[in-house]
Image (spheres, grey):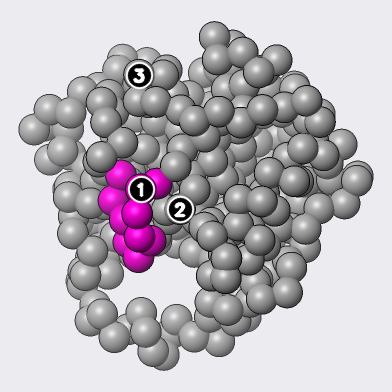
Amino acid sequence: MAKASFSRRTVLWIGLAVAVIAGVAVDVSARQFGRYFNAPEPQNVNPRYDGRFALARIKYNVAPGGYYYRGLPAWAHGYPRAEENLEQILDAVTAVHPHLKDTVIVGLDDPELFKYPVSYMTEAGYWEMSDREAAALRAYLLKGGFIIFDDFRDPPRGGGGFQTFAANMARVFPKGRFIELNPKMPAFHSFFDIESFDIIPQSYDAGRPLIVGLFEDNDPSKRLMAIANYNTDISDFWEFSGDGYLPVSASNEAYKIGVDYIIYGLTH
């Protein structure tokens, strides 16, 4: 697949795709009241597997405090709009043509996970994991799977924050070591060229985002198996890019990061 750059044409294409997603902009208050409160826990029927790409959202047991947003469990924050919108962008600007409305929810210990090479978890500070799930996630990643962690931060807003996330991953790979990534690494040049993390938009988190990764054999020259966006919520821009109150320019950057992650996961 040909690699794209940050040309004006590329930005225009993403901007147009965002506009298609947006349709008619809604008032900011719509996010704060009414349809964004008291949402039921998602009950999803996954599409029959047909080889097309779908970003698999990971469902997990939620620690206390993880139901603060719309009454949803932490694993479902942003569902299904975040992945639906990201996949529309993926469909518009790449040769990957995913399921556009058929979303996927899967548990770590569900054998169906192995049908989806790229998976996504939100709010990992509230993530509770069994030994069975730890073993299944280890097998998935070693077999070639790639997992994206996004939208978690320091306590009290983020549950156990990075400590909970790191403790869980230490059970998956006891000798694994997350390292801070830099924008020169291949994951940030798999489709778009991301030259600086300064482009990462912040929706409500304060301070600098931290992007870390876990490589095979802890070797940065080998395959990246897991990537974590900490102290940031990139998926917030996927979820709300069509609501008319987030800048299109910021949503563009968030989509570039998401597309790069997916293309990296599909090609490594």
Q: Nearer the viewer, residue 226 or 9?
A: 226
Q: Residue at x 17, y 50 (%)?
A: 249
Residue 208, which numbered label? 1
Q: Residue at x 43, y 85 (%)?
A: 35
Please provide percent x and percent y for residue 124. Answer: 63, 54
Give, as a three-letter code, the residue at label 1.
Arg
When the figure is inspected, residue 138 is found, relative to residue 48, above or below; the finding is above
Label 1, residues with CA under 10 Å away: few <14, some 14-19, many ≥20: few
Q: Secondary structure at mark 3?
A: loop
245 inside magenta stretch:
no
Q: Can the viewer see residue 264?
A: yes
Residue, disc 3: 184
Please provide percent x and percent y for residue 39. Answer: 56, 81
User: Relative to residue 248, is residue 166 drawn left or right?
Assistant: right
Residue 136 in which image quadrant: top right
Label 3, residues with CA under 10 Å away: few <14, some 14-19, many ≥20: few
Identify the mark nearer the N-term, 2 or 1: 1
Whether pointer 2 and pointer 1 mark residues with C-beta atoms closer than 8 Å, the reply is: yes
Q: Residue at x 15, y 38 (%)?
A: 11
Residue 231, which numbered label? 2
